[in-house]
Image: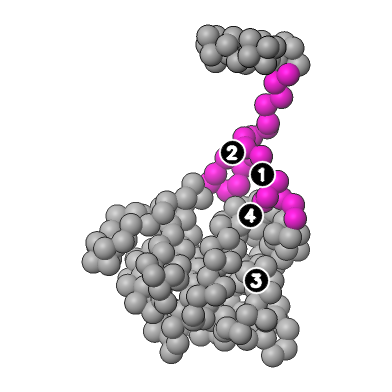
């Protein structure tokens, strides 16, 4: 009966009054807002901070000396989630836009990649150019040493480095593509149809920069007849139908 009366009172009271009542009774403990790069939330974020994912992210995010602990946490969480779905999808995995390799290392460890029977392709010219227009600008916070990245993986790891920009055609079907190309949004959009064609049914493409310029992707998306999943991190996700 007490619970029923409480439910009735809540349904009748305006939310602001009900929340004030709970605070006065010490029953309402709002969570603090947390920021993950461009996203803020007051939801329970323990899946991002604890468990296997939290431990792996905390161990490897600092491979990029310019990352703070939460800068890429939510993006890495999304990438690991969608990559996990693709474990059984035929084909290899791709990380396009590598820099210091923190994202690639987090994915490799989270997926226990050495036991998947697949190859992880790392695609990056390591030039640090800020745009695809050839205007010569170079990012000061971009890693230009591919050996730094390759040293993060064990000897004999199924990792292949391609020192060239996207678009790129790889020799085998693909199961998962993670793209993080910074300001080079036009290159990312141009690569999408090529990557999509190479994806096996059930494969997934996720880009960190989709929401930086949604209109840039629209012509390619229209030709493919697909609609991305927009995420509050600014990422876009395309799943190839089975």
Which residues, given as a range, are shown in magenta?
Answer: 27-51
The residue beneath circle 1 is: 45
**What is the crowding at mark 4: few (fewer than 14 residues within 10 Å), some, or many (at least 20)?**
many
Q: Which is more foreground, mark 1 or mark 4? A: 1
Q: How much space separates mark 3 and mark 4, taking CA atoms?
A: 16 Å
Q: State yes or no: residue 28 in magenta.
A: yes
Q: Are marks 2 and 4 in contact (CB under 8 Å)?
A: no
Q: Is residue 35 visible?
A: yes
Residue 213 lies in quadrant: bottom left
Q: How much space separates mark 2 and mark 1, taking CA atoms?
A: 8 Å
Q: Quadrant of the C terminus?
A: bottom left
The residue beneath circle 2 is: 41
Residue ranking furthest to the front: 1
Q: Earlier in the sequence, mark 3 or mark 1?
A: 1
Q: Nearer the viewer, residue 104 or 140?
A: 104
Q: Quadrant of the N terminus?
A: top right
Q: How much space separates mark 2 and mark 4, taking CA atoms?
A: 13 Å
Residue 111, disc: 3
Report the residue at 53% width, 63% height from top.
82
Q: Are marks 3 and 2 in contact (CB under 8 Å)?
A: no
Question: In the image, is residue 168 above or below residue 180?
Answer: below
Q: Are marks 2 and 1 in contact (CB under 8 Å)?
A: yes
Looking at the picture, how far across and down is residue 103, in whole percent? 61, 67
* Tally of numbered discs: 4
Question: In the image, is residue 46 above or below residue 176?
Answer: above
Looking at the picture, how far across and down is residue 205, in whole percent? 44, 67
**What is the crowding at mark 1: few (fewer than 14 residues within 10 Å), some, or many (at least 20)?**
few
């Amino acid at each position: 009966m007490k619970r029923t009366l409480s439910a009735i009172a809540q349904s009748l009271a305006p939310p602001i009054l009900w929340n004030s009542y709970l605070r006065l009774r010490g029953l309402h403990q709002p969570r603090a807002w947390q920021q993950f790069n461009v996203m803020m939330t007051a939801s329970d974020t323990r899946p991002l901070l604890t468990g296997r994912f939290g431990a792996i992210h905390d161990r490897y995010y600092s491979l990029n000396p310019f990352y703070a602990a939460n800068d890429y946490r939510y993006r890495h969480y999304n990438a690991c989630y969608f990559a996990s779905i693709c474990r059984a999808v035929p084909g290899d995995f791709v990380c396009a836009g590598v820099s210091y390799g923190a994202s690639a290392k987090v994915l490799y460890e989270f997926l226990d990649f050495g036991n998947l029977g697949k190859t992880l392709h790392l695609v990056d010219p390591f030039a640090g150019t800020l745009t695809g227009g050839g205007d010569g600008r170079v990012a000061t916070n971009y890693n230009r040493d591919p050996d730094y990245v390759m040293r993060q993986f064990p000897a004999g790891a199924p990792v292949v480095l391609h020192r060239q920009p996207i678009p790129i055609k790889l020799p085998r079907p693909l199961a998962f593509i993670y793209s993080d190309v910074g300001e080079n949004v036009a290159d990312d959009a141009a690569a999408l149809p090529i990557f999509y064609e190479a994806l096996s049914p059930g494969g997934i493409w996720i880009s960190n920069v989709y929401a930086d310029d949604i209109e840039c992707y629209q012509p390619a998306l229209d030709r493919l007849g697909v609609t991305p999943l927009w995420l509050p991190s600014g990422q876009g996700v395309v799943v190839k139908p089975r």
